[in-house]
Image (tube, rainbow, N blue to C red):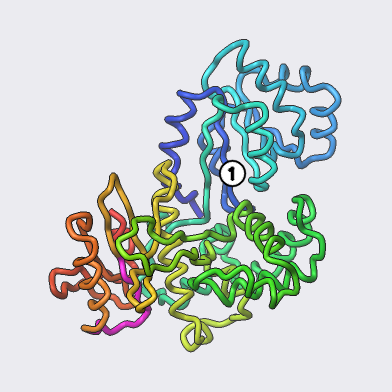
Amino acid sequence: MPMIKRHISEVLLRLSTKFPVLTLTGPRQSGKTTLLRHLFGHYDYVNLESLDVRTEAEEDPRGFLRRHAEGVVLDEAQRVPALFSYVQALVDERREMGRFILSGSQNFLLMESISQSLAGRAAIQHLLPFSIGELPARAKESLDARLLKGAYPPLHDRQLTAEEFYPSYLETYVERDVRSIRNVGNLSLFRKFLMLCAGRSGQLLNMTSLGNEVGVDHKTIQSWISVMEAAFLLYRLPPYHRNWNKRVVKQPKLIFLDTGVLCALLNIRREEDVRTHPLRSHIFESWVVSEAVKHQTNRGQRPSLSFWRDHSGHEIDLIIEDAGHLRALEVKSGETVLTSWLDGLQWFKQVAGECLTEAAIIYGGDRVATRRDTKVIPWRKVTEAFG
């Protein structure tokens, strides 16, 4: 199967001409190594996961870097944190752009090393699993099949099934990566925490309630959520900040960045199980938000996303802000467009006034439509809603 073009490629190539160090992070198996070896094939490639290579870098860092003086991709760079100081010295000495390409799956540890030694010298980007726009269109693929499969590359370029991939992926994540990040002690409780988070995806985050169910305090929940964010499994969608109404919800929403992971944690194994699951609407909402995150991240932007909800029940599922202008999106998993879907957007138009430049509904059907000057966008064309 030919390599699928990643939308972030042009951003990475451009930044490699403007910064001495380019850093690409992202979850395991998101395609970082494949992409970097494709874009920078003329560079040396070094994987610091390999024990012998890591030992060489630790015992003779100057000699190690000198042997790769003409450009190097350092994969899993966080495995040798002491190397960053030597990279800094070479960068400051020669001031060549794009000489070092760093990548890693443990974002927390990698960013800690960069902030200590390479602040201001490194451009930092993130590669998430495939967006819908990167994958070949499959007319016969159903929404439920897409939600179950998720977007990790091995399920698309190696034709693995969700049931073959996700259990081992999650086991590797919990057993290996979590052990290397601080603030996680009891792995059994952490697994329970993961499953309880899955049941809350697309819903408001209440750390105290979650902590009570897991059996830990809210500070532990806070640190574990930070671990999941650093591993790119979880995203906290914040409430919109403008105070049009004092009776607004201040809690963020919990969003899983891949619905394949989410379905695996919910023990959903078949397409028909997605279709009838009581949390299907929340799974679909998580998918839409994750696509919005990818859309902005692949452009080299920090996601500027939020939602709105007040205590009277008015809600907008997703707000995209650009230079003070707002795009309001309602997310509905049903296939039949209902007039009632417009109620929240009509209300929000009165609240937001001139700040609101566009409103749309993203739904689980296949036809483009317009209702009361509001676009109704099918899930396959979700990126059209993001601007």
Give the side of residue 149 with respect to residue 8, left or right.
right
Residue depicted at x 31% and y 56%? 386
Give the side of residue 35 with respect to residue 244, left or right.
right
Residue depicted at x 85% and y 32%? 55
Look at the image and give the residue range highlighted in magenta: 329-338
Quarter-of-image position of residue 14: top left
Q: Residue furthest left?
A: 373
Q: Residue furthest front?
A: 246
Return the residue at label 1: 25
Q: Is residue 163 magenta?
A: no
**Against 52, is 254 above or below?**
below
Residue depicted at x 62% and y 27%? 118
Return the residue nearer the eye: 111 or 167: 111
Q: Residues within 10 Å of mark 1 (few under 14, many from 20)?
A: many
Name the spot of residue 20 as percent of width and height, x first.
55, 22
Give the side of residue 272 with respect to residue 364, left or right.
right
Characterize the magenta stretch by its predominant secondary structure. Answer: loop
Return the residue nearer the eye: 267 or 343: 343
**Against 206, is 5 above or below?**
above
Q: Secondary structure at mark 1?
A: strand
Badge 1 amino acid: Thr
